[in-house]
Amino acid sequence: MIPDLDIYRSAAVTIKQHGEDAPIHAAMRADGMLEEGDLEGYGVWKRILRAVGELAVVAAAPSD
């Protein structure tokens, strides 16, 4: 099992590399893993996709 910290690090890198297209990129990677029959890789990319969404919400939240 990949630790959550590594998932969030991967999500942050994905956001840095792909900007607002990060969720699309992560979803495409997850789909690619599923098509290849790599269920573990699919699960990892689904977790990264979820983390990308969470980090986007945090970044969009107004700061006080």
Image (spheres, grey):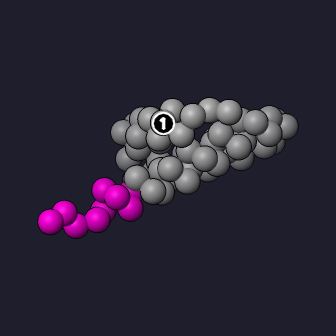
Residue 52 is situated, as x and y percent measured from the top left of the image, at 47, 50
Q: Verify whether residue 57 appears in magenta.
A: yes
Q: Which residue is mark 1?
A: 5
What residue is rendered at 56% in x and 44% in y?
48
Judged left or right of residue 14, residue 16 is left
Q: What segment is highlighted magenta in the picture?
A: 56-64
Q: Quadrant of residue 59?
A: bottom left
Judged left or right of residue 49, residue 36 is right
Name above or below for residue 60 compared with residue 15: below
In the displayed image of the protein, which residue is found farthest to the left? 64
Residue 57 is situated, as x and y percent measured from the top left of the image, at 38, 62
Quadrant (top left/top right/bottom left/bottom right) for the N terminus: top right
Quadrant (top left/top right/bottom left/bottom right) for the C terminus: bottom left
Residue at disc 1, secondary structure:
helix
Q: Quadrant of residue 35?
A: top right
Residue 28 visible in image: no
